[in-house]
Image (cartoon, grey):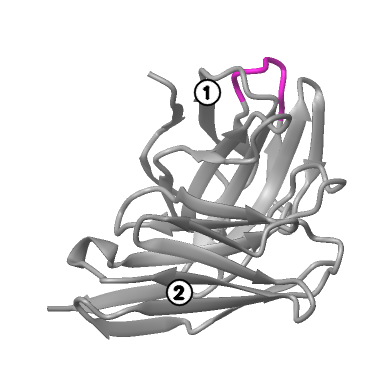
Amino acid sequence: GENVEQHPSTLSVQEGDSAVIKCTYSDSASNYFPWYKQELGKRPQLIIDIRSNVGEKKDQRIAVTLNKTAKHFSLHITETQPEDSAVYFCAASRWDSNYQLIWGAGTKLIIKP
Amino acid sequence: EAQVTQNPRYLITVTGKKLTVTCSQNMNHEYMSWYRQDPGLGLRQIYYSMNVEVTDKGDVPEGYKVSRKEKRNFPLILESPSPNQTSLYFCASSSGTTRYEQYFGPGTRLTVT
């Protein structure tokens, strides 16, 4: 079955710098890749997603890139701010999997002032 | 307001005492799911439901039961809770047909002593 690995488990960056979180997946048939953000004590919320027919997607300071050949996708956050501090989860899914998301273990992003 | 609600939010119980955590969504979503979240293990799926009367096991179903008698409700039942079920539980829902975004409830923190 599908397996999603996420790295690093913890990432500390200076405010204003960029942060990159990477996920690899095993099932080449996976075609949907969302990223969720979970702030401390709160529920996970979708921040951006990408489908396999697109190589990159941007939304203001966040972007996701997908390399289907290498089976990895990454979350990029530019000009990091204190409110970016959270745990970020990647996930993968395929169209015929009953909407099942296979989750990465999460990355704790710490923004240093 | 579109939302997923869970009750109770916090629960401390003893080993073997049956409990139910309720989950309700008002978005007419077909897909609903239960996750548990433990430090370092990310989100692990317990059970999911594609529609009324249709449920299936996730990755960690042992010790849990669910039912889906109505589209809006998806309760999680622990018939005989044990300490290893101490965790943070999230219910989530998704339309599944046009959008894959999962909307999470606020979470239920369960402690079994």
Question: Considering the numbered disc 2 on the image, is that residue within a helix, a strand or a loop?
Answer: strand
| Amino acid identity at mark 2 | Thr
**Residue B81: in sight, yes or no?**
no
- Residue shown at the point (68%, 50%) measured from the top left: B46
**Residue B55: in sight, yes or no?**
yes
Left or right: where B83 falls relative to B69? left
Name the spot of residue B110 as percent of width and height, x first. Answer: 44, 50
* Segment colored magenta: B67-73
Marks 2/1 same chain: no
| Amino acid identity at mark 1 | Gln
- Residue shown at the point (40%, 48%) measured from the top left: A43
**To which residue does mark 2 refer?**
A107
- Residue shown at the point (21%, 67%) measured from the top left: A81
- Quadrant occupied by the C terminus of chain B: bottom left
Up-down: is A59 above or below B52?
Answer: below
* Disc ID at residue B25: 1
